[in-house]
Every structure is written in C-alpha cells, then in structure tokens.
Image: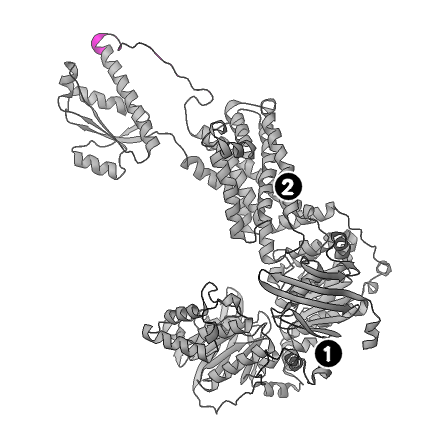
C-alpha cells in the first residue's frame, strides 16, 4: 500500500488529546492519532503501554474520560452513535478465548453471537457453516470452547467476531501464548477474510515484532504515548535499523534505552559430561489420556535449555515431573544424578521456579518478599541480610526495596521474581515464559542475567518461550508436540537440518510433520467467500435492524445462561438442592420445642411417696428418665457432660413431712446453658409439681387445692405450640431471598471476572435484555426450589398448606423476581464473586431476620428498623406464608401484602438497569 494512497483515505479512527487513567496510573497520555481505513494496522509495544486501553476506547467498551474519540464517523462519547456503530465493530479482547463461554460448544457460541446481531435461523446456519468450514472448526462443533486448544480458541473467537461482517475488526494480542503454527494459520485466515472484505479495517495489538512486520501500518506505543506511526519499512528507514525490534528500541526515550547494548551469548564451555537432568522414556497418563509419551533427553549443568511446543503438547506436565510435582507413570527422571521422588524436599531446594504470571505477594514490599522467601527456603537467619543485599545489587533492586510490587514496571517485577527464584542459590532454574509482555530493552536485560547465572554460576536453566528470537539464544532446544519430542538440538542445527530460513519456519515444518494443523481440512486455510456456496449466497445479506429492545436478544441471553447453569454442577446443585438442604438444617436446627428431656432423680427418701413423685414426671411425654443419681458429685458430672438436662433432688423424710403437712423443699437443678430452653423446663417442672399436689389433695382430702381463679388458655392456629408450624413458613421466605439473590448476582459478576462482560459492552444487546436474560432462568429455578421446599414442609415437617396454594405460588413468583432482582442490583456495584456474595448475604439476611418479623414483629420496632421492616419485601412474604400455612388465608385476605411486594419489582429492576454500565469505567 503506497503512502500517497493512504493520505487520500478518510480515517476510520481519529483520536485527539485522549487521556485515560486508572486511579493514579495514567494509561494513555495525550494521544493524537489517525487510523487510515481499509488497512491492517498494528499497535506494537510491550504490556502496560496502553495498547489494550486504546483499543477498548475505540471499540466503545470503555468510557472516554478526556479527549475526542471519533470512530466510523461519529463521537464515541455519544450513546446514539455507539448504538449505531456497535454492529459495525468487532472486538476480540486479549486472552485466549476471553470473549467465549467455555461451557458452551463451538456451535452454541456461534449461535449466540449470531442471534445477538439479529440473524434469522437460515442466515445463522449459512454463516456458521461458512466460518467453521473455512477455519477447520466444523468437526468440532459439539466440543465445549473450554476444551479447545489455544489456537482453536482464537479461531473460534475470530469466527464470533466475524459473524456480522464488521467494518472495523479489533484484535487485542490475538496470538499471545499461541504456538507458531496456530499463529501462522490465524494470520492466513485474516488475510483471506480481507480478500473477501477489502474495505474492512483490522486493528491488532501485538508484542511479536515478526508479526508486526507483515502489517500495512504500525503504531508504536510506550508509556501511554505514541512513539511513531507509519509502514514497517518507513519505521525501519526512520531509525536506520534492519529489524522492527531494533527500531522499537531506537524509538524509545533516551532515558529508557540509556546504556543499552544487544545481548551477546557467551558460548557454553565444552561438554563436561556433568548431567543436571536426565529423562529416560518419561510417560505420564491421566486415565486413558497420555499427556507425555516416551520422552527422553539430557541437559548438562550450566546449559540454557529451551522447551518449545504447541499449546497443550505436554510441556508443563513434563516440567512438573522433572521437579517431582507430578508422579511419573513410566520412565525415570534423574536430577543431579539422584532419582526424583515426589516427596523428596531436598531435591526441590536445589531448584528455583519462576512462573509466567507474577506470583509474589503484592501486599509485601520488595525487601519483605526477598526476606520471606529466604526464610521459606530455610536460609540461616544470620545469612539472610547478606543474601538479600546480594540479590538487590545483582538484580538492580537497591532503589526499590521499600516499594510494593504492584507499583513497579513489568520488567522490574520480572527481575524481582528472578531474584526471589535464585535467593537460595539453586543449581537449576525453571522459567515458564518469563519475558511475556516485557519490552525489548527489559527482555534483553533479563537475558543478560540468565546468561550470567548460566555461564558464571553454572546454573542449569530450563526455559519455555513462544518468542523465536529468545529460543535462538538457548544452547539447545527441544520441540514438542502431542506429548512427544520431535527434535532436540541447537537452534542453528534445527534450522539447517530442515533447510529452513528461520527457526519459526523449521518449527512449523516439524509440527506439520507431526500431524499438527489438521484442524483445517486438507491443511488448507482458505476462507471461503459467501458467494462460493450456492445461488442463495449470491444475494447481498440483508442489513440488520438493531432496535432498542429485541426479544431475540433477550431470549439469546436467557438461553445462554440456562445452558451455563445446566452445565455447571455446582450452580445447578446450589439452585435446586441448596435450599432443601438448608431447610433441613434450619427447620430442625431452629426447633424450639422442648421434648424428650433427659432427667435423673436423686431420691434421698426412698419411700413409696417419693417414688410416686418421680413416676409422675416419668409419665410425661416431655421427659425421659435416666439412671438415678446417688450423689451431688455424680449430678454435677452428668449435667456438665450433657447426659441430663434436669436433676430432681427429693430430701430425706420427704414422705413423712408431706403427710404431716410440714414444709418440704424439692431441689430442681436445670442446665441453664440455653436460657430459653431452661425457662421452658422450669415451667414444665412447676406444672408437673402443681399437678402432683392436686392429685395428692384429691387422694387425701377428697378435693382439689383451693384457688381464687381458674384461667384456661387455648392456642389458635398452632394448638400444640410447636416450633415447626411457626418456623417452616418463615424459613421458606428466608431461603427464597438469599439463594436466588446470590445466584443471580454471581451470574453477572462471574462475567466481570472472566472478561466475557465485554460482550455486553461491544454487541447490540441492551442492559435490559442482558439483565432480564440473566434473571429469568434463576426465577424459574427459584420457583422449582419453592415447590420442593413446600413439598418438604408438607411431607417431612408435617406442616400442611391450610390456605390457598395458588395464592402462595403467586406470591412466591413475585418474591422470586424481587430476590433475583436484588442479586442483579448487588452485581452492578461489585467486581468480584467474593465481594458480591458478602454484599448479597448482608443485604438479604440481615434485613430479613432482624427487621422483617422473623424474630420480632415489625410493629414492635422503632426508628430505622421500623422503616426498613415496612418497605422490605420479606416482611410481606412472611405475612403471606404464615397466613396460608397456619391461618388458612386466601387471595382476598392477603392481596394488600401482595400489592406491596409487587411495587418492589419495577423499583429494583429499574435501579439495576440504571446502575449497570454499558461501558467499563
């Protein structure tokens, strides 16, 4: 593409004075940029320089804070323009399959995105067939997205992005973490797509400079600023360099590249024969699946050994077996001449391990992290200060010892991770993609440290990487696919033996020979044009009208959520059985009935009358007699152990004193650990005592004891004054407010954590459609849960529904809408699943238990408690539940409470819709 031709194009994107901050961190700093239309545009630079932030602003996924962002001829600040432009933009976020739903199959993911963009059934089928045939995904239509390889996930993500023929395709590091073959296939697809849709503009963020070389126009970024723009050739000519990586380094500010020199690899001094790692016929099986198959290699002490392979080829499994983290199925592993055993900690102390993701403690300073890991590796306390000082000097950490890791640049954090990994002076260092996302200068500085550790300290370095220029720095590399090692040689030898020009070309050739790349039928990556299918495909696709509200989009969200719940056993179990389990626990656990009390008698009289007194108590259904007592010490011991709750002491001469009408003192000892229970026992004993006295008066005097008045008490609705008829109707509303609210809240916040919430931001789906689509499945599940709890109440707890069951179902349906609405409301202001669980639990259970009438009636409350109780829906559901279960009430009796609950429905849903943002802050 000639520069002159670009100048005549209308920019598809124009940014003027754009700034974006996350708290105190400035991600984009005064960016002015124009993106020509119809080109493949690459944003190059390491992680954290603002590429993703810039793309999210252009896609409309993030709100504009400052400046002007014009995309497809309109201002992205304006909601009306975003709604118009959204169907013309496709945004594929950073991360493998980040815009996909892992439990949905390939077919279901594509169906979902096609429905969101308004395609009818026939059009969806046509597009899905074309895309999956062209990408080789058709044989995997039924496979869950979560079980695809990294390359296949990215292909599926691309298909989902292309389902609606966008004018602007935005790809945020689509090939990061993907093996070279899958990367090559991905870009072949993009090239074929652009042949069929020549007017499409493709914007790509990448950290791979070899990829950027093939783009038509580049934007180099660093520190939130634009360093330069132009074609790859223009940037090379401007900087006087022969590679884009060197050009990027030349474009960096002087202070960032001060003192920079290219990395020089010091040759490894002769083969001493000292073997650090030896693997022979190493095999690992998980059930019927063989993850690693007959792998053998040797690594010499001090060697830098690169481990490369396609995604899912078994690299990580092999590394875990080498270090004893996984048991070996077959074969042997020798580490420094000693066989590796899973529980041998002495071997692990000779190894340092650095993960791809930063895994240190962000709440500890640099110094504290170093000291902590020194202690974890049992370095003597007296040696720790010296060892920490040595690491700080060697890895240039002296000026940041009191800083928190989160405040450090990515390259510095990687140096800190390396310092922590070697603080105990390991003989072997395992590095899992240690420079992913690090800028070229920091990456080269990191490699100097590795070379020094290898050549000076004779540390054996075992490293995985997807950067081919890093792989070429290794003394030897092993290429792996499908659990097998394809070759094991120095990089130059591998290139020469394959007759390739580059290591990447040689790697791809080995992968193809090993059977990789067969996802695409016939090994052909051609993207079939719609016109190539049939006569109907020759017709121009009908433009889709994206209305403000679409029943199809709503049902699509509902359909997807239902599938996810169905395939998530934890959520499905919690939704259907969680309430029943809790009802069992709460129904029996909150039982206040005092029956079957164990008691014992200390009879110091041993006469017929004293035994008659004891037998009077034993005949009650409330008491169960235990073995008699013989001393105060025994009484104390049995009360303390909970063997009995009540002890009765009959004094000596009990019968004689009663017969002579002398005062008699009967001792009653009650376990008072539970005051309410103790008071009930006291009442029972007093009643029993009064009955015995009446019996004695009748027997001895022919008449009952005189009384000035007689009070007869009768209980309505619960004549036996049992707990279950009172508690069960209260437990049902409590569980119906808690669990449905939590499940609905988690469904939204889970998407925030996983990143799929971007599909709300960048597709035509509205907030109302999204929330109602989320809510409806949980309302249905809540109603099923309500039916199950009602059956449980009637059958197990023997609490019958005396009133109108249909009225109870109507009230429960309204109440379930309210409960799930409360969950959606909680999800609008929380960002983590843990936070939303706490918020939902506090927001439902505390008002329901304290202010809704479970313990104290609302009329007895005052001030804020009375106000909360009068507006909280659980108050009215409790009235309805107790009225129908206990008082045989119907709709005519309870309609005022139902109407008050009904008022809450629109209030809660409207608040949820207003508070849920259609863009990230």
Residue 149 place in picture, x, y as percent: 61, 66
Q: Residue furthest bottom?
A: 270
Note whether residue 200 is visible.
yes
**Residue under numbered circle 2:** 909
Residue 252, horizontal then vertical, whole percent: 64, 78
Quadrant in the picture for the C terminus: bottom right
Image position of 355 (left or right of 660): right
Residue 906 pos. (x, y %): 65, 37
Q: Kindly tell me whether residue 577 is visible in this rendering.
A: no
Using the image as rendered, state which of residue 211 and residue 846 is in the foreground. Answer: 846
When asked about the image quadrant of residue 349, the answer is bottom left
Q: Name the residue nearer the viewer: 606 or 160.
A: 160
Q: Residue at x 73, y 78 (%)?
A: 232
What stretch of residues is rendered in magenta? 699-716
Residue 638 falls inside the magenta stretch: no
Vertical side of 597 occupied by 843: above or below: below
Residue 701 colored in magenta in the image: yes
State the predominant SS element of the stretch in magenta: loop
Task: Determine the CA span between mark 1 and mark 2.
Answer: 52 Å
Q: Is residue 206 left or right of residue 275?
A: right
The quadrant of the rendering that contains the N terminus is: bottom right
Q: Is residue 479 above or below residue 356?
A: below
* Residue linked to disc 1: 232
Quarter of the image where one finds residue 469: bottom right
């Amino acid at each position: 593409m000639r520069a002159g031709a670009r100048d005549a194009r209308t920019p598809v994107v124009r940014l003027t004075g754009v700034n974006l901050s996350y708290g105190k961190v400035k991600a984009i700093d005064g960016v002015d940029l124009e993106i020509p239309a119809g080109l493949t545009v690459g944003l190059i630079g390491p992680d954290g320089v603002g590429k993703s932030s810039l793309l999210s602003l252009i896609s409309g996924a993030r709100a504009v804070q400052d400046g002007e962002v014009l995309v497809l001829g309109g201002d992205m600040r304006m909601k009306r323009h975003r709604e118009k432009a959204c169907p013309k933009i496709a945004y594929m976020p950073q991360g493998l399959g980040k815009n996909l739903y892992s439990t949905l199959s390939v077919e279901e993911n594509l169906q979902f995105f096609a429905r969101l963009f308004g395609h009818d059934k026939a059009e969806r089928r046509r597009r899905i067939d074309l895309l999956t045939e062209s990408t080789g995904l058709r044989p995997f239509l039924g496979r869950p997205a979560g079980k695809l390889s990294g390359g296949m996930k990215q292909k599926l993500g691309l298909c989902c992005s292309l389902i609606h023929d966008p004018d602007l395709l935005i790809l945020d590091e689509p090939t990061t973490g993907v093996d070279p073959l899958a990367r090559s296939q991905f870009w072949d697809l993009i090239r074929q797509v652009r042949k069929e849709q020549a007017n499409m503009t493709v914007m790509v963020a990448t950290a791979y400079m070899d990829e950027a070389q093939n783009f038509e126009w580049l934007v180099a970024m660093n520190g939130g600023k634009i360093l330069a723009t132009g074609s790859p050739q223009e940037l090379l000519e401007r900087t006087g360099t022969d590679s884009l990586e060197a050009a990027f380094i030349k474009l960096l500010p002087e202070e960032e590249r001060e003192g920079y020199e290219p990395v020089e690899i010091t040759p490894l001094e002769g083969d001493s024969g000292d073997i650090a790692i030896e693997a022979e016929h190493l095999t690992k099986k998980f059930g019927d699946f063989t993850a690693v198959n007959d792998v053998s290699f040797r690594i010499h002490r001090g060697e830098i050994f690169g481990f490369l392979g396609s995604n899912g080829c078994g690299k990580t499994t092999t590394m875990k077996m080498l270090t004893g983290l996984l048991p070996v199925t077959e074969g042997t592993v020798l580490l420094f001449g000693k066989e590796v055993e899973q529980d041998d900690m002495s071997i692990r102390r000779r190894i340092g391990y650095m993960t791809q993701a930063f895994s240190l403690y962000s709440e500890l300073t640099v110094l504290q992290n170093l000291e902590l890991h020194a202690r974890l590796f049992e370095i003597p306390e007296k040696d720790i200060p010296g060892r920490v000082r040595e690491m700080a000097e060697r890895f240039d950490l002296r000026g940041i010892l009191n800083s928190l890791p989160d405040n450090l640049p990515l390259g510095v954090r990687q140096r800190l991770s390396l310092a922590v990994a070697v603080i105990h002076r390991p003989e072997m260092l395992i590095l899992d993609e240690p420079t992913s996302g690090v800028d070229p200068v920091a990456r080269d500085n990191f490699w100097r440290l590795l070379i020094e550790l290898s050549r000076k300290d004779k540390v054996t370095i075992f490293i995985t990487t997807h950067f081919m220029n890093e792989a070429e720095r290794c003394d030897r590399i092993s290429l792996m696919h499908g659990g097998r090692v394809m070759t094991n040689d120095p990089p130059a030898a591998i290139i020469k033996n394959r007759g390739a020009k580059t290591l990447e070309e040689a790697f791809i050739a080995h992968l193809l020979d090993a059977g990789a790349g067969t996802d695409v039928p016939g090994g052909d990556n051609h993207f079939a044009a719609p016109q190539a299918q049939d006569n109907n495909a020759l017709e121009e696709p009908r433009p889709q009208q994206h209305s403000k509200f679409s029943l199809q989009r709503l049902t699509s969200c509902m359909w997807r959520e239902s599938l996810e719940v169905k395939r998530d056993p934890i959520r499905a179990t919690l939704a259907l059985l969680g309430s029943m389990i809790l009802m069992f626990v709460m129904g029996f656990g909150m039982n206040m009935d005092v029956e079957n009390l164990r008691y014992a008698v200390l009879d110091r009289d041993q006469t017929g009358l004293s035994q008659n007194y004891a037998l009077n108590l034993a005949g009650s259904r409330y008491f169960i007699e235990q073995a008699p007592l013989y001393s105060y010490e025994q009484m104390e011991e049995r009360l303390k152990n909970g063997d009995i709750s009540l002890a009765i002491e009959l004094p000596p001469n009990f019968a004689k004193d009663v017969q002579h009408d002398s005062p008699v003192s009967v001792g009653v000892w009650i376990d008072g650990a539970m005051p309410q229970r103790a008071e009930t026992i006291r009442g029972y004993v007093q009643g029993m005592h009064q009955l015995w006295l009446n019996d004695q008066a009748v027997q001895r005097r022919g008449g009952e004891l005189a009384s000035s008045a007689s009070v007869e008490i009768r209980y309505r609705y619960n004549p036996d004054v049992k707990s279950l008829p009172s508690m069960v109707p209260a437990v049902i509303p409590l569980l119906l407010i808690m669990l449905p609210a939590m499940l609905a809240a988690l469904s939204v916040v889970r998407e925030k954590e996983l990143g799929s919430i971007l599909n709300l931001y960048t597709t035509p789906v509205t907030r109302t459609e999204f929330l109602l689509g989320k809510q409806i499945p949980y309302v249905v599940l809540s109603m099923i849960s309500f039916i199950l709890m009602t059956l449980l109440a009637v059958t197990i707890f023997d609490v019958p529904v005396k009133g109108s069951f249909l009225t109870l179902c109507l009230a429960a349906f309204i109440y379930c809408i309210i409960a799930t609405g409360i969950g959606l409301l909680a999800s609008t202001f929380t960002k983590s699943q843990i936070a939303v669980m706490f918020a939902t639990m506090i927001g439902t259970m505390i008002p329901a238990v304290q202010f809704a009438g479970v313990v104290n009636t609302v009329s007895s409350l005052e001030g804020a408690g009375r106000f909360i109780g009068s507006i909280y829906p659980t108050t009215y559901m409790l009235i309805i539940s107790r009225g129908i279960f206990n008082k045989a009430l119907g709709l005519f009796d309870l309609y005022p409470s139902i109407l008050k609950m009904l008022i809450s429905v629109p209030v809660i849903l409207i608040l949820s819709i207003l508070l849920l943002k259609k863009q990230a802050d």
